[in-house]
Amino acid sequence: MSVPVDAGDSSPGRASGPSEVQRRRESYRRRQTVRSVLIGAGSTAVVGVTLTVLIMGSPGWERVKDTFFDLDVARESLPAVATGLWLNARVLVFCAVGALLLGLMVAIMRTLRGPVFFPLRALATSYTYGFRGAPLIIVLYLMAFGVPGLRLEGTPSVLVLGGIALVVTYGAYIAEVFRAGIESVHPSQIAAARSLGLSYAQTMRHVVLPQAIRRVTPPLLNDMVALQKDVGLISLAGPIDAIRAAQISTAQSYNFTPYIVAGVLFVLMAVPLVAVTDWVTMRAARRQSAEGAQ
């Protein structure tokens, strides 16, 4: 008498590989994925065509096209704007490193315990409250035009002062992100580390900060993306970066296309960082889901 074979049986002696139920499940998932991609592509095409028809069919489209999308003006302004973008890239590196270090230091100051550290906590709290509320453009004007007005010896250049304005402003936001990560570490881990004989500094370095930084990496990267965008505001202080170069080209050609060129270059510069941010965010979400399922 023959014995019916269970499709999901994987006992020794039976054929290895996925069962019939598993193959049907995977086939269903592939069909659903293809269906989702086709629907997404179709809806995107419909929206794109609709927007194109609306914009290009508007009465003033020809004038807007000549004013903002002139290819000849774009080619002429591209070298100067690209040269200015190199300055933006260098300022971005300086400001990113400075804001991260300042934010981490302020976050540690805000998490210090004990009455003896109250002045440091009050100073850090005042800093984060003040610079998170102050508009960046006002801080930039104050640093770039107010500080040189003091006529002090050794005053740095306007470019450095503009970078400092970005650092102190973004340092306040980043400090709160770091503080959220530090306070997300359970107090029992700190108590366990201290019971093993680690000092407070060793506990922060070896136990708290590694976990805190890993947890807040996605929002930190988002702040870096925002900083990359706001680096263009340094043109208000006078340095010839990409935005200032576009402004000069616009004044010479009476055409706004150089601003579009600068905007496209900024977007291209931000794409790698945005992609890394999305990848890190997705990875963190998957890790949290896996930890929650355990």
Image: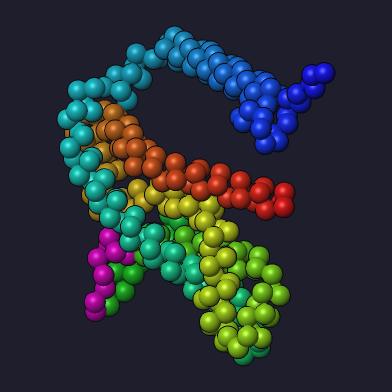
The percent coordinates of residue 54 (x first, y second) are 49, 12
Residue 25, above or below 121: above
* Residue occupying the far front of the picture: 1
User: Which residue is more in the foreground, 274 or 166?
Assistant: 274
Residue 264, above or below 5: below
Quarter of the image containing the N terminus? top right
Please identify the quarter of the rendering in which residue 245 is found: top left
The residues colored magenta run 153-161
The percent coordinates of residue 22 (x first, y second) are 67, 27
Residue 185, above or below 248: below
* Residue occupying the far right of the picture: 1
Q: Residue at x 55, y 47 (%)?
A: 283
User: Which residue is more in the foreground, 221 or 256?
Assistant: 221
Q: Is residue 96 left or right of residue 128?
A: left
The percent coordinates of residue 123 (x first, y second) are 55, 78
Q: Is residue 15 left or right of residue 263?
A: right
Residue 108 part of the magenta-drawn span? no
User: Which residue is more in the foreground, 102 or 164?
Assistant: 102
Please identify the quarter of the rendering in which residue 62 is found: top left
Residue 103, above or below 70: below
Residue 165 visible? The answer is no
Task: Count up the numbered dots.
Answer: 0
Residue 280 visible? The answer is yes
